[in-house]
Amino acid sequence: MWLSKAHLLLLSLLLSVTAVNCFIPLVGFSLNPTDEDGDDNWSHGAITRRAVLDAAADFLRDLPDCNLGSLATVRPSEIFQEISRIFMSCFGRVVSAARFYQAAIQIETANGGVDLSDVTGHLPSAHFDAEKFVDANARLLDLRTGVLTAIEEGEYEAARELTGQLFHTLQDFYSHSNWVEMGNTGPNLNLAVPGADIGPVAGPQMETCVDCSKSFLWYTCEGNIIDSVNEQGLLTSGYYGGQTDMDGNDVPKPENVKCSHGGRLDGTQDTAPKGGINKDSEFSILSPHSRYHYQAAQLAVQASRNFLNMIRQAKGDAQFANFLNLNTGSTLCFVIDTTGSMADDIAASKQRAYEIIDSRVGSPTEPSNYVLVPFNDPDFGPALVTNEADMFKQEIDQLRALGGGDNPEFSLSAIRLALVESLPASTVFVFTDAPAKDAELRDTVVSLANQKNIKITFLISGSITRRRRSVPRSKREVGNRDTYIYIAQATGGQVLEIAKDEVFQTTRLVDLVVTSAEVNLLTMQSVQPSVRAHTVPVDSSMSDLVVQVTAVGATLQVFNPAGEQLEIGGPDAPVTIEIQLNKVLVVRIRDVTAGEWRISVTSSVTYDLRVSAQSTVDFAYSFVKMVTDTDHFGVKEIEGRPVAGEEATIRVNLIGSDPAQVSDVTALSLVALDGRVLQTLPLQENEPLTEYFATSSSLPDVPFRCRLEGKDSGSSTFQRLITSVVETSTSRLQGSVDPVISRLLPGGTVDVPFSLSNSGQQGSFTIVASDDKGFVRRVTPSSVTLARDATTTVTVRLRAPADVAFGTTTTVTLTAQTSSGRSYNFLVFRITVSPPDQDNVPPTCEVRALFGNCKGTDRASCSDRTFSVTTAYMDEGYGLQSINPRTFATNYTWTVEQFAPGLSDTTIIANYTATCCNPKVEFAVSDRVGNYEICTVDLTPPQGLSGGAIAGIVIGVLLAVIIIVFIIVYCCCIRRRQKDDQTDSQVTKRSDKTDKGKKKKTDSQVAVRDGDQNGRRFWYRFARKQEVTTSGSGNVVMKKTETHETRVEVTKTVVSETRQVKVKVKGHKKV
């Protein structure tokens, strides 16, 4: 567990009144140090965010025109601000970082949940405690398999949850073991690697620690790990009080032998050897080895980032982008009734889908993925999920309006499939003219949609009351129509009842909504006709304001901040009409300025009003609980609805928090469906412009929405609204699923326990569990009567088919509702199918043959040359899962002989042919449990020079040589002349002067070369001035300067008076 520095004052207060096993109300895993905390303390949340940020930056740097610069100086509290800056740098203002932010939060939340779970909070192998290195690494390997197989099956949300759980255990290795104390400066590269050895572990009876000295409140632990343990490279970790293994058996600390985890929360810190070795925080009172905290945290960041990069290498860029929501667009999702009367609707949806795809292809606003779910009676599905626009076109083109049974259809079953496959914060569009036959799924659909923040909008054409039936069924008609209205209202969508000939024009709304940067400013239902004026605050980050009023014959007027009424009309008008039908009017304002805009609505009946805009600044919120009653404290998200009558804490995360656009966030308002403000809650800042908390003593007892308020950088009002509706409940469902403990195997069964508690009046609850894969077998009990404040255990049993693929994930929605319907709550969980045993051997990939080459080709001639590669693949474990080439080529041939997923112990041959325009290709093969291998062929020709370039270089070199030679000759001549003049002045007679028995010759000295006595003049290249002094004994002293020549030794003859003296002189090269 890594601790945050937040609330240190509360920590000091608590420690003064608590015993050893105290509970510290620190904000834990999801909160990072604020600016005043500095960069020294890193929580699990900060480590995870940093690793996700770095991995995303590595991915985005490979995009064209995406220059991110260095991220080395980004502080923990600035990580999410940096995410917004990165997206702005790469994509501009048309792409929001919201979905990537939500992916990071999902990983981070799952990370923190390991500490806060009743299942894993006290499990040593989940934290690398009690020297459970083998078990902990086995856990990492199981989670790694789950991540890779879930991604292979397209189950990205499950993969993110599994990654968060893996990260927690992986990061704890560096905080809880002695890896840092051994002197290691890099991460352990063998962790979570199939077949690798993570290193030797100290024996069970081997002493690993000695006592620490104790100050007033805490132990001072320096050098308490026995030297021989670190010197031999033996791994050890501390024991923590109250831990149990997977079978529920206590894991006590061996007294006088092993290290403690340590810190005021650890009940073993006073058991010899006293003290501890954890590095969870920078505070000695919590972490005896706090001096190693920063180093351990940085190794945890590197290890987490390495794991993310492994995912990218194993699964390729496309799936990695889906995994981290790095795609820039939204989901284009159609759920379409295909019964006989829907021909016009199918044609309209098809035409609109074509227009959206064709107008956005290749741009940042192109949809990230496409989901198509047909339904009728008695069938629904299957769901088409693809990133390929052409495949979506092909599938929607094949839809036909045929048949149909009785009037209602399985619309909600189809919607549930679409919700599972759609990206968070998307909109699902449902085309139908029939009521729902499976209305019992209403709460399941709403629960799943709210959990993923997905809006559901219904386009109901014609009358849903008379199709194919002559017998009136008014009761069902009203109920099922209300079912659609309830779902739309609860999820922030809408119900548009239109005529058949209005379907295509209405689908223009799809084009306006399917964008990653849509934000909501105002949503009001059933507004009375007497209420006409509505103020809409527009801030500097916004563009393209969209206003929709829904009512028969309604009209509107638009006034800018200066009070001027704007003309509403065609494409050239300031306000353009996008949709104008009998019941729906939609207008767009393209050039908006910051300030208060005013919308005036005229209607003779109640109306609905919605205002949205394009902006990269938005927010997300969740109801949370401050956990202070366990050894692991922190912030835990509340599943389902908040409980009525209790104090509620709301965590608010600002998205796109650029200080240049937003200067302050001031309040969170709880707004009724008709727009009335029910409560205004002040915000407590945890991270500037990133994370805040609001507290309500008791939430409203009517449905409400959350609205964030503040100021932009120009002091204009900043406002954002989440359109999904919040309702309270008097019951609560709680529980968690650990994928290692609750393993679901092919053909196997698993029971998952939860708790149901009742805080309201005594009542009878009906408990229902449903899932999208049909794994749920039963719920025990299916009904129960609970008194006030009573709790019971609910068990969900799931069984997987024997032939199901590893990584298949089922999304289960568990609901509990009183017979009166006044109390309802839900919980959504996922469970992934695992292999029975660990397979640590990757498949093999071999290049068998290579034909052709790309030498001598360039961009102009590359298409005329081709090359072919023959590769071979085999797996000896669970069998091959996929074989794919990775290339930038768009036109290539790829054939695989006799391949089927699951094939083992058989060699598979594949052939690849492409032009030399893309001469590099990777061949990736994975097995059924996620092990992978990659072999690469790169025929990229050496980067040579053209003939013209070579000729130019040769001519340039020759000219340079000629110029240099000329300069050298010229300089030598000048130098020679100077030396000759210098020598002439030096060859003169020197007169003798006697000073205390010494003779100094300064003149009349004749220099000759090599003992030549014929009087030839000699010049010294190595000296500019010389003095020769002789004593009575004949000793000679000579003063000289250094030469410009290489080191040589020269002997010269100097004649002075009647004596000859030989002097040896060394010259030095001057550099």
Image: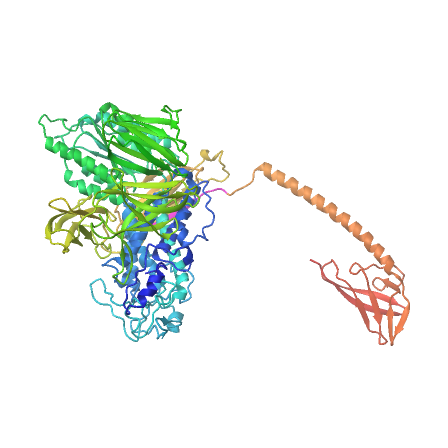
Image: 441 above or below 310:
above
Estimate the x, y position of residue 220 in percent, counting from the top left.
38, 72
Which is more toward the observer, 455 or 535? 535
The residue stretch that appears in magenta: 932-941
Left or right side of 64 for 416: left
Q: How is the image coloured?
A: rainbow
Q: How many marks?
A: 0
Image quadrant containing the N terminus: bottom left
The answer to if 384 sits in the magenta stretch is: no
Residue at screen point 31% across, 41% down: 721
Image quadrant containing the C terminus: bottom right
Estimate the x, y position of residue 572 in percent, counting from the top left.
40, 24
Say whether residue 875 is visible.
no
Determine the residue located farthest toward the left in the rendered image.
471
Q: Main secondary structure of the magenta part?
A: strand
Image: 1005 above or below 583:
below
Left or right side of 726 for 997: right
Say whether residue 572 is visible.
yes
Which is more toward the observer, 903 or 602? 602
Q: Quadrant of residue 671?
A: top left
Q: Quadrant of residue 585?
A: top left
Which is more toward the observer, 59 or 697? 697
Which is more toward the observer, 627 or 70? 627
The answer to if 935 sits in the magenta stretch is: yes
Left or right side of 537 for 583: left
Estimate the x, y position of residue 468 in percent, counting from the top left.
13, 26
Estimate the x, y position of residue 655 in percent, counting from the top left.
36, 45
